[in-house]
Amino acid sequence: MAITANQLITTAKKLQGYKATAYSCTPNNWFYGYNVGGDVAWCAATVCYWFNQAGASNLIPVKSANCGVLARGFYDKGQLVKSGYKAGDVVFFHWSNDSSSSVPGVYTLDHVGIIISANSDGTYTTIEGNTGSSAYGECLVRTRYSYQISCCGRPKYDSSNSGGGSSTKPSTNTSKPNIYFQVCTAEDGWLPVAKNAGSAGKDGHAITKVAVKVDKGSVWYQAHVKGGGWLGKVTGWNYKEPVNGYAGNGKPIDALKVYYTTPDGIRSTGTYYCAKYKTSPINASTYYDWQIDTDTDNGQDGYAGVFGVAMDKLCLCLV
């Protein structure tokens, strides 16, 4: 059966406030077919229970009380997402930064729930079983942060309302944002502004300062100087303001972090953007691998560049 995300969320909320006991837990009882107490983990069983109660068990790839098995089912079906989370997604949380043994390229899969809404402040409202402070867990609506999310499974809801429950309102200005960037070298001063996957810099001239800005949303960036450490995060663009107008202190930069936050109007459509960037070691004809925001999965370092090696070119875009 095809249902909308809103219909699934409405079904899930019917269990809100429920508390398991040592002798009985409604989702576990349904899952195992006999009375099972809340001392047996029941977050994944609850997700399966909700889809069953909504008459849409076909929308989850496998019936399992194990978060890893459930996430792997979505992965094998090509329905696992690592960004752009929205209402109705089956959300998997990680309580450590260890890698998952069940799904490649994500953190541990420690807990699971359903996203009710993606919020304008970057948080997510969720509903979860086996959470809270009661002895055997309860079903609660919670606020979670993006850094707690390992990944999400995306059921194939009825397309008439595939993203129901979002707390943000659509905007008429949902075109792709632009990102602009500029670099400074000791020999040249500030070089021309580059835009959207262009290249900034000059062969053989070490970059000593970087400035980044966007026309929608927000961006922060941070420079690491050769022989030193990470300087402070920067959110502005102003050559006359060394504290928050550019990144760098006049010494060669060897590593860079860039992180983009999508504006509410675009987020409300279910679309999210990330900063994608790469740098070239000085006097080299090639670039290092691409970096996405400050991600550390799939072999990424969380930054672009190599400590101890100055950079002379920067390429940056939004994806």
Image: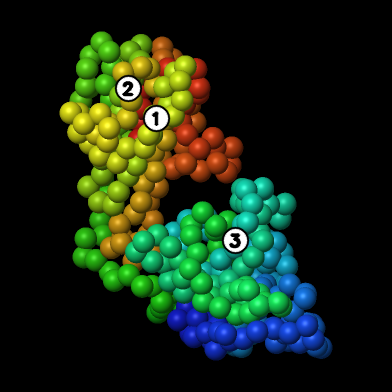
Task: Mark 2: give few (<14), some (14-19) or many (20+) Cα within 10 Å.
Answer: some
> Which residue is denoted by mark 3 in the rendering?
93
| Marks 2 & 1, CB-CB < 8 Å contact | yes
| Marks 2 & 3, CB-CB < 8 Å contact | no
192 up-or-down from 300: above or below:
above
**Disc 1 element:** loop
- Decide which of 286, 252 is in the foreground and name it: 252
Type of residue at label 1? Answer: Leu
- Quadrant location of the N terminus? bottom right
Type of residue at label 3? Answer: Phe
> Which residue is denoted by mark 2 in the rendering?
249
- Decide which of 156, 153 is in the foreground and name it: 153
Is residue 281 at all visible to an observer of this figure? no
Task: Mark 3: give few (<14), some (14-19) or many (20+) Cα within 10 Å.
Answer: many
Query: Residue drawn 36% across and 61% down?
Result: 121
Quadrant of res 236? top left
| Marks 3 & 1, CB-CB < 8 Å contact | no
> Which residue is denoted by mark 1 in the rendering?
231
Query: Residue drawn 67% across and 72% down?
Result: 44
What is the CA distance from the residue labelled 2 to the residue labelled 1? Answer: 8 Å
